[in-house]
Image (spheres, helix red, strand yellow):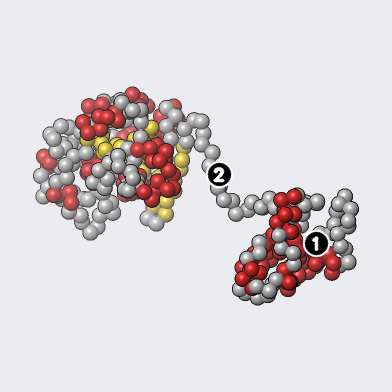
Amino acid sequence: MATTDKYDRQLRLWGASGQRALGSTLVVLVGSSACGTETLKNLVLPGVGSILVVDDDDAAVVVGNGSSSANGGGKCESSAVNASPELPDSLLKFASHSSNFFLPPRSNQDDVDNKLSNAAQACALLSELNPDVHGYHYTVPSLEDLDFTSFLKTLMDNPPSSSSDASSAATPKKILVIAADQPSSITLPISHACHGHSIPLILVRSYGLLGYVRIQTASPYHAIIEAKPSHKIPDLRLSAWPLFDGLKNVASSVNNLDEMEDTKDHSHVPFVVILLQALDKWRVSISAPVDPDLAVRPRYPETFAEKEAFRKVVREMAKNINNEINFEEAIREAHLVWVD
């Protein structure tokens, strides 16, 4: 898989190891609805390893090579999984009322002997988006009658492969299952089977402009955390006494903001330094300077009036509050001075 230029932008996001993990994954889509095919499209374009579209049909249909893609039983046989078929011209004609770009409505004029199942049509069009991705489809008479436990076990033991994919067939593939717009009679057996085989499962459903996504992670369970929580208080320790050495060094880098004549330098002073100097000025204004004995904790704003007075001191230290973002930030983060 050539990833140097084709996937350059996403490689900057998750790196080469992430791209390799994506390229070694088999995504199984259960249900070829518009929501499901759009979800799968967003994995095909970045270069997922292979896809398998599984869907039911009213009757056994015939694919382009003449082999049946429908299985009469509820168990998956490796020979029943077919590679992506060739695209007939009729598959490229879309009706204006179609809600699924990857599943055009069938025409009554189509040759019945050459019509493709829903899974085959979606697989063929999705595979056209990225030649690095190997597409497969599997059609069953009814998804409700499919034994998902044995189906997933077969995929784990013998993942689908083609002649062009023979090099990666020996490499164990990670499996991700996506169930799109399926009723509980189908999603519950899928959920039980995925849990038993430690396979992650994503349930997606759309209602027009609304929808939901449910994630069932494999064991050991995946913890999702907020990388940049908006509620987290920065650990600046402005209210700790005495100040730690690193903070003292930063504060001593600027002697007196009032004596700084260069407006450019004045607007680039870190807001932490502004808060510390404003705190010293506020203590002088209430006749409570810092005691030379470091064991004595100095005064900090406590009441609402004192906190507003402190913010006023910060505002008065600015040369032009409208043009100095650092002072705006200092006023916004003034509470860091008195919080624990």
Question: Residue 291, image x and y in percent?
Answer: 88, 57
Q: Are marks 2 and 1 in contact (CB under 8 Å)?
A: no
Residue at (88, 63) in percent of width and height: 288
| Within-10-Å neighbours for mark 2: few <14, some 14–19, many 20+ | few
Q: Closer to the observer: label 2 or label 1?
A: 1
Question: Residue 152, image x and y in percent?
Answer: 35, 28
Kind of residue at disc 1: Pro
Kind of residue at disc 2: Ile
Foreground residue, 118 or 316?
316
Residue 195: quadrant of the picture: top left
Q: CA distance from mark 2 to mark 1?
A: 34 Å
Q: Residue 284: tell me if it is visible.
A: yes
Is 106 rendered above or below residue 281? Answer: above
Compared across the picture, whether 59 is left or right of 50 comes to left
Question: Residue 234, image x and y in percent?
Answer: 66, 52
Res. 301 mark: 1
Residue at (14, 38) in percent of width and height: 64
Res. 198 mark: none
Secondary element at tag 1 = loop
Compared across the picture, whether 312 is left or right of 138 comes to right
Secondary element at tag 2 = loop
Foreground residue, 50 or 170?
170
Q: Which residue is mark 2?
A: 225
